[in-house]
Amino acid sequence: MIASRLLSLLIAASPVFAQTPRPGVNYDEEKVGNDPLPDLKVTTADAWMNSRRGEILKLFEQHVYGKTPTNLGAPKFEVTATKMDALGGLATRKFIHVSLPERPAWQGMDVMLYLPNGVKAAPCFVGLSFGGNHAVSAEKDVPLSTRWMRESKDKHIVNHKATEATRGSESSRWPLEKILKAGFAVATAYYGDIEPDHADGWKEGLRAAVSRAGVNTTWRDGEWGAIGAWAWGLSRIADFLQTESHIDARHLAVIGHSRLGKTSLWAGAQDERFGVVISNNSGEGGAALMRRDFGETTAIITKVFPHWFTSQYANYAGRVAACPIDMHMLIALAAPRPVYIASAAEDHWADQKGEFLSGLHAGPVYALFGKKGLGVHVQPSVDTPVGDFIGYHNRTGKHDVTNYDWTQYLAFAKRHWGL
Ligand code: GTR
């Protein structure tokens, strides 16, 4: 027990583990699992929208992420600061405190919104960050988060407060000027505002605050985990954006990287207001097919990060074929909306091919709507974006969000929205 706990901590603590092949983990294409994928059972577009989509959504609630509560009351939005000449005049920057008046135990989250100046109603990218608003933006007057922080990239279990040194530390993943110059707004919040990302994080986050038994809650199968809570936060940002006159709320793209890419897919599956859904290197528990057992597996992820999922998911450790879903069904839940899956060529841990294949096997649902999915059957070579309503690329480099990724996402959103 102690040994496995130690192993879990090591895996969780080290990004090196996330990149370097590890003993006991399969990286051999010859040895991938070959259990058949669960059948999407697609018949007609109407049947998909009116019944099958709902059934699959329920399966993801029961077996993977848990059910998102719908009885938390209306969120309250307070604009706490507005700056008209942010980023050298390129943007108007607002901070919005989102809270739940009926659930005052939740401390709320602070959304940072950048609106491109000169655009009447901007389409918007919506995503959570790992480091807080002050890490996304390098602007000196963005308040430092006062909430739980990872101590460093290597140690994210320990409680810690943000320091000036982390200002702008995530800015390469959020090329604000590039996005704003393309005419898009950016709405982001810190995932730790919703729930700190460690095994006991829920006790100081939204889940305990809204649960009847509070910190004494015993989570049952089918109840939500951290990914569910984070995805809920994305939908509350969408709620706010509906009220913001400088946003074109019909054009919201939800985006996330890695565990937040899993979150983005789950948010996009549940909330159809996200008209474009983007998964950046989301891997296991996200876009990667679980039945392949390549790189990170269901067994590993549910052992190291049990708090991300509903408890039932861990029952599929080592027996993925027993799980009634696989991740092509998660991609399909975005249909008929455009969805983009991105891999990174060095990110074997996330199983690039498994990410591609979930897109490929979601294709039949898009076909019901007369829409082309990936348009190819074989994973394309690196740095070769493909796809129509299902976009895909495998970028040179490691597990990260880069300028290259954003170039594709901006082009994808523009193409689909006719911008
Ligand atoms: C890893 C984890 C992945 C991925 C990644 C991240 O440790 O195994 O599933 O989510 O973290 O979020 O950076």
Image (spheres, rainbow, N blue to C red):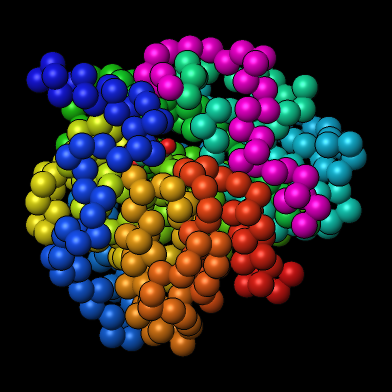
Q: Quadrant of residue 110?
A: top right
Question: Along the line of sight, which residue is nearer the eye, 391 or 399?
Answer: 399
Q: Residue 345, percent across and down?
A: 45, 53
Q: Residue at x 11, y 59 (%)?
A: 321
Question: Along the line of sight, which residue is nearer the eye, 111 or 350?
Answer: 350
Q: Residue 80, percent across and down?
A: 72, 27
The quarter of the image holding the N terminus is top left
Is residue 3 visible to us here? yes
Q: Residue at x 25, y 31 (%)?
A: 304
Q: Residue 143, percent across and down?
A: 69, 20
Q: Is residue 226 left or right of residue 233?
A: left
Q: Is residue 150 magenta?
A: no
Q: Is residue 163 magenta?
A: yes
Count numbered badges in the picture. 0
Q: Quadrant of ligand 1?
A: top left
Question: Along the line of sight, which residue is nearer the eye, 109 or 383?
Answer: 383
Q: Residue at x 50, y 62 (%)?
A: 382
Is residue 273 visible to us here? no
**Position above or below: 61 against 9:** below
Q: Residue 287, percent across and down?
A: 37, 56
Q: Is residue 354 left or right of residue 369?
A: left
**Position above or below: 131 against 271:** above
Q: Is residue 136 left or right of residue 200?
A: right
The quarter of the image holding the C terminus is bottom right
Q: Quadrant of residue 361?
A: bottom left
Q: Residue at x 20, y 68 (%)?
A: 37
Question: Along the line of sight, which residue is nearer the eye, 408 or 44?
Answer: 408
Residues in magenta?
Answer: 154-182
